[in-house]
Structures are given as structure tokens and as C-alpha cells.
Image: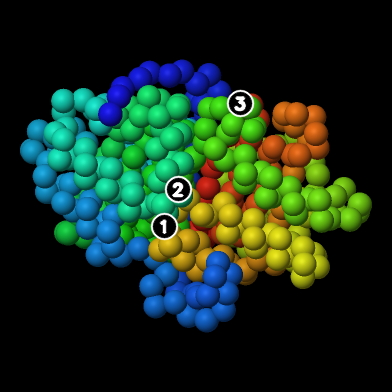
Amino acid sequence: MTKAKNSCPDCDTGVSRRQFVKTSAAAIAAGGVLGSGVWSHAAPSTSDAAESTVKRFYDSLSEKQKGEICFPFNHEKRTMINPNWHITKPQIVDDFYNDDQRKLIDDIIKGVSSEDGYERFVKQMDEDAGGVGSFAVAVFGKPGEGKFEWELTGRHLTLRADGDSVKNMAFGGPIVYGHGESNPKENLYHYQTKKANEVFAALDAPQRKEALLKKAPRENAVLLQGAAGKFPGLAVGELSSDQKQLVEETIKTILKPYRKKDVDEVAAVLKKTGGLNKLHLAFYEQGDLAKDEVWDIWRLEGPGFVWHFRGAPHVHTYINIGVKS
């Protein structure tokens, strides 16, 4: 693991999650991202690979280490989200951790990721910050003794593992991913923009007029609005079945970096909050990098779902998916 200090002038925008709504329990699910039926486990549990490794990691910490990186479950640091910050002072590469603990951290990252996602996250951390060693971690609560959450933060990435301690909140809370590469062809997440723009290409002229807006909202404007919310862009419920299928394929594509249990919980939340038909899709003329009308900034939003993808000048993505109580 290497250690690097890379600046990111446009990465200093953040938001406290104190205002992020509390969530309530839900159980829904099955077959594919938006399929019908009932899942028996629509969220990660304490026995899943990442969470059980969090317990081992916590148990490996000395009292001195716990004093530096462990906090009560409701500590305000757990409620912060930012595309470029360190949740605790020690970085993973520091002598503060031993090699076994670094291996456990790597195993947790693997545990919350799909195989493809792990490769992308590692490559992004290498290119943006010199490697995972330049990131920081924290543990909230006491694994094995009630609610807990493990969190990794650094440049352009936030990952969480909570064993469903935050009920019906996908990923354990809002998360961020991104990549500092400004050339769309080299950016690790430009494939997601290309997929989203397949939906735009399938729209007719009136639909495009409704979906394409001039200026994007703040990238961190991702508070959940609930059923009474006002959402930008084109209502997915007004699309044809073929167009809706493209939206569903886009959701599946953008969820691919994450483990199945988190994807399951996203689907459960989406179903609970009205399903695909309650989402709105917006594209923004602002930030068209190649002037090619492949819109680099886009947003999917509904009562319990916000996915804001800012692809210009480089990728910052804020995700917040949960049930507003």
C-alpha cells in the first residue's frame, strides 16, 4: 500500500447527514433488480462476509487504536458525506495498523463489492490517491454488541458495512464514488453515462424536451423527499414499456459494483417507495465535455431514491437510497 496526497479543488463540497431522514423497516423483493416476489433477506446481515470481517477487525484493535478510530454508533462523523475527506486521522498505510489489519480492511472492501466493483474501486484508489493506503476507516458502535457500522473514506470513495443496523437504508447510508480522470474514455465510470444516454436516445422529441434541463442541482443535494417530493426531469411512469426496460437496465448497470445484498436492499427500498414508475430521469446540458450531446451529468430521483452522477469535469456520484419515515 502506498500513500499519496492528491488535491481535488472541486472535491470539497460535502453535506451533513443530520438532516437525512430516519428510515423504517421494510421487506420486499426478488428476481432481478425490480422483479416481483418476496426476498427473505433484502439487506446485509451481521453474518455476511463483510460484517463478520468488521467484527474480526474490531476485535483486533488495541485500546489505543480504538481510541483513535472507534466512536459511538450515533457519532456525528457517521452522518457526514463528502467526496474527499478522511473520517479519521490514521491512514491505512500508517504504522498505526499492522499487516493483518490491513488485510482485514481489504477483505471488507471485497465483501461490500462485486468482483467487478472491487477491481474498479482498487484502480480508482490507485489512480486518485496512490492506493488504498491513503484512505481512512472508522468503526461506529461495537460489532457483536448491537448496532455498528464500518466506514472507509478518501478521495472519491465512501464505502460502508452495517449489517442492516440502519434499517431500510441501502448501503448503510449515503455513499460516494468517483474518479479523477477528466477524459471520458479513460474514466472508470463513463460506461454508466453511456448506458444512461441509451435511454435519452430512445426518447421522442417531446420526451427529450422534458428530460433535458439547463443546469444541474448541487451534486450533494440528495436529501430524500418522500412521496410528496418534487423531482426534476421526465417521469419514468410516462415511458413506454421498452423505454422503462432501458431505465431498469441502467439501474442494474450502475449497481454492478456493489454486492448482491446491497443491490437487494436497493430493490426493496425502490419497491417500498413506489417502484420504477415513481422515478424521474433528468439530463443536463451543463458539462457536456465533448460537446457531443452525450450528457455527462444526469440524475435518477424518486421518493426514496437519489442517484446524482456528475461526469464533468470528472466523476463525482452521490447516492442516497432509503425510506422516508
Q: Is residue 66 left or right of residue 285?
A: left
- The earlier-in-sequence mark between 2 and 3 is 2
- Given residues 69 and 188, the one toward you in this image is 188
Q: Amino acid at mark 3?
A: Ser
User: Marks 2 and 1, how far apart in space?
Assistant: 8 Å
Report helix, strand or loop for mark 2: helix
Residue 136 percent location from the top left of the image: 30, 33
- The earlier-in-sequence mark between 2 and 1 is 2
Q: Is residue 130 left or right of residue 191?
A: left
User: Marks 3 and 1, how far apart in space?
Assistant: 27 Å
Q: Quadrant of the N terminus?
A: top left
Quarter of the rendering containing residue 225: bottom right
Q: Amino acid at mark 2?
A: Gly
Q: Can see residue 80?
A: no
Report helix, strand or loop for mark 1: loop
Instruction: Name above or below for residue 245 compared with residue 313.
Output: below
Residue 219 percent location from the top left of the image: 60, 37
Instruction: Name above or below for residue 215 compared with residue 248.
Output: above
Pointer 1 residue: 259
Residue 29 percent location from the top left of the image: 50, 74
Instruction: Name above or below for residue 158 compared with residue 167.
Output: above
Pointer 3 residue: 182
Determine the residue positioned at 35% across, 63% down: 44
Using a 10 Å C-alpha cutoff, classify the residue at mark 2 as few (fewer than 14 neighbours), some (14 to 19) or many (20 or more).
some
Using a 10 Å C-alpha cutoff, classify the residue at mark 1 as few (fewer than 14 neighbours), some (14 to 19) or many (20 or more).
many
Determine the residue positioned at 40% across, 25% down: 129
Mark 2 touches mark 1? (CB < 8 Å):
yes
User: Marks 2 and 3, how far apart in space?
Assistant: 20 Å
Q: Is residue 137 left or right of residue 112?
A: left
Pointer 2 residue: 117
- Given residues 86 and 135, the one toward you in this image is 135
Report helix, strand or loop for mark 3: loop
